[in-house]
Amino acid sequence: MRLTRTAAGPGGTAVHVQGRDFPTNRGGLCRKGWTAAEVLTVGDRLTRPLVRDDRGDLVPTTWGQALDVVASRLEGLQAEHGPEAIGVFGGGGLTNEKAYQLGKFARIALRTSRIDYNGRFCMSSAAAAGNRAFGVDRGLPFPVTDLDDASTVLLLGSNPAATMPPLLSHLQGVRERGGLIVVDPRRSQTAHLTEQGAGIHVAPTPGTDLPLLLGLTHLVLAQGWADTAYLEQRTDPGGLESLRRSVSAWWPQRVQQVTGVPVATLTQVAGRLAGGDGVYVITGRGVEQHVDGTDTVTAAINLALVLGLVGRAGSGYGTLTGQGNGQGGREHGQKADQLPGYRSISDPAAREHVAAVWGVEAADLPGPGLPAVELLSSIGRPAGVRGLLVHGSNVVVSAPDAGAVRAALATLELLVVSDVVLSETAALADVVLPVTQWAEEEGTMTSIEGRVLRRRAVVPPVGEARSDLDVIAELAHRLGAPGRWSTDPATVFDELARASAGGIADYSGLTHALLDSGVAAYWPCPAEAATDELVGVPRGGDVVIGTPRLFGESFPRPGGRARIVPVTARLREPLGQRDGELTLVTGRLLEHYQSGAQTRRVPELLAAQPRLVAELHPATASRLGLGEGDGVIISNARGTVRAHLALAPGMRLDTVFLPFHFGGEECANLLTEAVADPISGMPEFKRTLVTVGAADDAADDPRRTHDDSSAPVRQEILR
Ligand SMILES: Nc1nc2c(c(=O)[nH]1)N[C@H]1C(S)=C(S)[C@@H](COP(=O)(O)OP(=O)(O)OC[C@H]3O[C@@H](n4cnc5c(=O)[nH]c(N)nc54)[C@H](O)[C@@H]3O)O[C@H]1N2
Ligand SMILES: Nc1nc2c(c(=O)[nH]1)N[C@H]1C(S)=C(S)[C@@H](COP(=O)(O)OP(=O)(O)OC[C@H]3O[C@@H](n4cnc5c(=O)[nH]c(N)nc54)[C@H](O)[C@@H]3O)O[C@H]1N2
Ligand SMILES: [Mo]
């Protein structure tokens, strides 16, 4: 069945969203996908540049004036305080072309090292763990369709029933075979489906996945289930011994004590993992967004390596990518420490190569900058940024300790936000630039499986909206930047491909034209792969080029072997809850996307989830004297959030769940702490201590339940 969805498009053009029959989604879309056309035409879509006037209002202006203001203030700030006074904040929703151009713009037009992006909140711990173990970070090193035949999947901290419904069809088989094991402190929709399918739901104390994984590895080793032949052949020498030492203290009873997971469950899970072919270990944000996220993912990888799963056909380790271009967004240089092609900005050879493509001297490229949390908290500090350009993130809602972020942004001397709507962050800006989005522009995105996909324009841009590529080029010209600044996505892609040549994420064999011809291209896809030695393996009618499966022969590390990095668990005081405190776990709802900037503007989605709902176990609620639907306040030293209560028997007694999709007083990140994993820079979104209590009556006033931060902007000027 082909379903069609229609929405009146800009200028009356109707945009139809149709589920394309594609190997990853098989014609299916999630609810956000079906309503995606409506995001193009939301009532308050930004259509003209806005500049803040003397009275503090954002008023419409021309592109020429807005860009002149931005360029002259950037120059002024840099003349006074040096290049590092300007920061750039990108997004994993940007196309590959935009992400590439933004990284280049920061380094050679602004000459600042201060660039990072929201992927730091999203993929960075799994990326860091993958890099150090395998020498490469590609979400799934195998096509997603490989999961169809799995016999056992250990899914750690991921809730695809809400966050990636099309993926569920690939887990359908393993679920029916009773082989799905979901690790999540709450009974998420995915955990619920798992239990229905006779799989296992493991509900550890939040933030104890690392000891849990060390405990599973301990059991595997103790039972003699390690694949020693694989370890000998495919991993660095000495790895097994160091691993054995690092897990030796994690005997099952101790793991039970720390994680709350019964010994019998641990034994059952370890047995399933070791029990045959078709075994996968997969991580999601639930285990990654912690101060020990990199080590936790490393422990998951070690478990997969000990079992000999990685690089063996029909088994493996992977992480489920987040945003639309979560994968491609982390390859082309918007990361603080990165140059295009997933190269390191600290590597002299990489600097030489990329500088040559950009037409500058390697010595002129800045070094590594600050990861997102540090970048934001540098604002207002002596060497901190004084001006910030934001492309594709709504940090006022999505960054940890959002109250402090809002206060810091207010002290900036210049905040420029390019967005499609007046997000909570854009509402604070000095200059707001209206940009084009998905169906209005050409470009490429890279999927969870490392497949490079073309995104095509089907409707003209709304109003005066322009691509981020135009914004970047116009500013680069005004700043007198060296190099070429094309606004044509195909030309930018060609340059990206050259810059990536020889890098880890090598796109040099690809062009828009080649991708348009319908090939299924997986990176690394070097020039040779696309021309002389094009390996045409038919798959679903497509020609496959590049590398659909990594690690079959070797790992891209010195010696070609994977590395077992022994990790240990610091005891993180799961018992640190004082009287009355609960652990706040945050996550996602099916109907909303991220900060909600887009989905809260789609009536169907807002109607389905209009306000912040806190989930609490009925026994905990009754202990606190609270009932279904009650107004509650959730607070800690950083902030206070208002929500309404839903009784959820699938919650642990010691936790409360909040989605982070709402702004204003309903913003879960008012409570989270700006602490980050020291290796990856990923913030601790999934474990925060809070107290929950009844709200006063005023909280039930419906007028208070929605963020109103865009109110100062006169609606008529947005037409
Ligand atoms: N509907 C919807 N879909 C989305 C998004 C969205 O905003 N809305 N965002 C996209 C993006 S950017 C991303 S990154 C992905 C994220 O996709 P997921 O990783 O599935 O997302 P989350 O809901 O953040 O977290 C998953 C689960 O982790 C659990 N969890 C919390 N703390 C812990 C813990 O300590 N240990 C364990 N084991 N689990 C824990 C939560 O209860 C939650 O059910 O989704 C993508 N898809
Ligand atoms: N408590 C808590 N907080 C979290 C998380 C969590 O699990 N718990 N998850 C984290 C994760 S995984 C993520 S990915 C972040 C995401 O959080 P954000 O970075 O805030 O992501 P979005 O809400 O998608 O914001 C993207 C913005 O870019 C705009 N936009 C869309 N397309 C374009 C474009 O082409 N160009 C430009 N310039 N703008 C565009 C959108 O309108 C929107 O305002 O949140 C993080 N925050
Ligand atoms: Mo994400």
Image (cartoon, grey):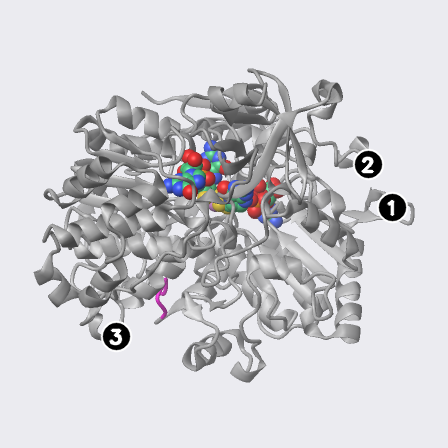
Q: In the visual, does 71 lie left or right of 237?
A: right
Q: In the visual, does 215 lie left or right of 657?
A: left
Mark 3 residue type: Pro
Identify the residue at horizontal 51%, vertical 31% (top origin). Answer: 656
The 10 Å Cα crowd at callout 3, few under 14, some 14 to 19, many 20 or more, is few
Q: Circle 2 — which element?
A: loop
Does the CB distance between marks 1 and 2 fall below 8 Å? yes
- Which percent across, then down, holds residue 297? 35, 53
Q: Main secondary structure of the magenta part?
A: loop
Quarter of the figure with residue 554: bottom left
Residue 341 among magenta residues: no
The answer for how far apart the CA atoms under marks 1 and 3 are is 57 Å
The answer for how far apart the CA atoms under marks 1 and 2 are is 9 Å
Q: In the visual, does 340 lie left or right of 152?
A: right
Q: Over which residues does the magenta segment extend?
A: 503-508
| Tag of residue 558 | 3
Quarter of the figure with residue 359: bottom right
Note whether 633 is above or below 389 in the view shown: above
> Between disc 3 and disc 2, whose residue precedes?
3
- Which percent across, then down, holds residue 308? 15, 55
